[in-house]
Image (cartoon, rainbow, N blue to C red):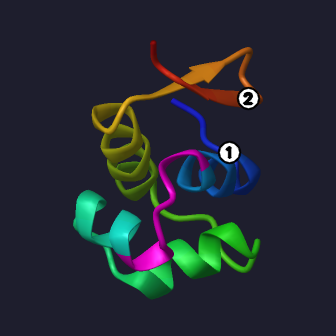
């Protein structure tokens, strides 16, 4: 399961979520989300999975390994 910082930012934009809201939805700290999206740190596999799962539960679909869209 992969997730890039760009996908995370784009998915948040589609949902109009702040980093805080994504942190809450994924049960992670805002700083974990911020550091990941700024390329400062790569979260653990479990944390990446939590971020992706929270976004998918909110209706985000990951496409072609590089993009995101709202599920219709």
Q: In which quarter of the image is residue 3?
A: top right
Above or below residue 54? Residue 57 is above
Range drawn in magenta: 14-20
Residue farthest along the bottom direction in this orientation: 31
Q: Disc 2 marks which residue? A: 67
Residue 39 position, x and y percent, is: 76, 71
Residue 19 pos. (x, y %): 48, 74
- Residue picked out by circle 1: 7
Check disc 2: other Cα within 10 Å, few if <14, some if 14-19, many if 20+.
Answer: some
Residue 11 in magenta?
no
Q: How many marks?
A: 2
Q: Horizontal and vertical percent for residue 11?
A: 58, 46
Q: Note whether 31 is above or below 53 in the view shown.
A: below
Q: Which residue is drawn at 65% across and 30% down?
A: 68
Quadrant placement of the C terminus: top left
Q: Is 16 within the magenta?
A: yes
Q: Which of 55 and 27 is in front in this view?
A: 55
What SS does tag 2 mark? strand
Answer whether labels 1 and 2 touch (C-beta < 8 Å). Answer: yes
Q: Which residue is drawn at 32% across and 46% down?
A: 54
Q: What residue is at 44 percent from the left and 49 percent from the top?
A: 45
Q: Earlier in the sequence, mark 1 or mark 2?
A: 1
Please rate how many residues cluster around mark 1, counting C-alpha atoms within 10 Å: few if below 14, some from 14 to 19, many from 20. Answer: many
Name the residue: 74% across, 14% down: 64
Whole-Å distance between the Cαs marked 1 and 2? 6 Å
Residue 15 is marked as none
Residue 27 sits in quarter:
bottom left
Describe the element under mark 1 as helix, strand or loop. Answer: helix
Q: Quadrant of residue 53?
A: top left
């Amino acid at each position: 399961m992969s997730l890039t910082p760009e996908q995370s930012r784009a998915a948040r934009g589609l949902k109009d979520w702040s980093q805080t809201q994504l942190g809450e939805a994924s049960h992670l700290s805002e700083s974990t989300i911020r550091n990941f999206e700024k390329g400062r740190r790569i979260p653990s596999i479990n944390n990446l999975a939590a971020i992706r799962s929270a976004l998918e539960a909110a209706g985000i679909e990951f496409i072609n390994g590089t993009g995101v869209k709202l599920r219709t």
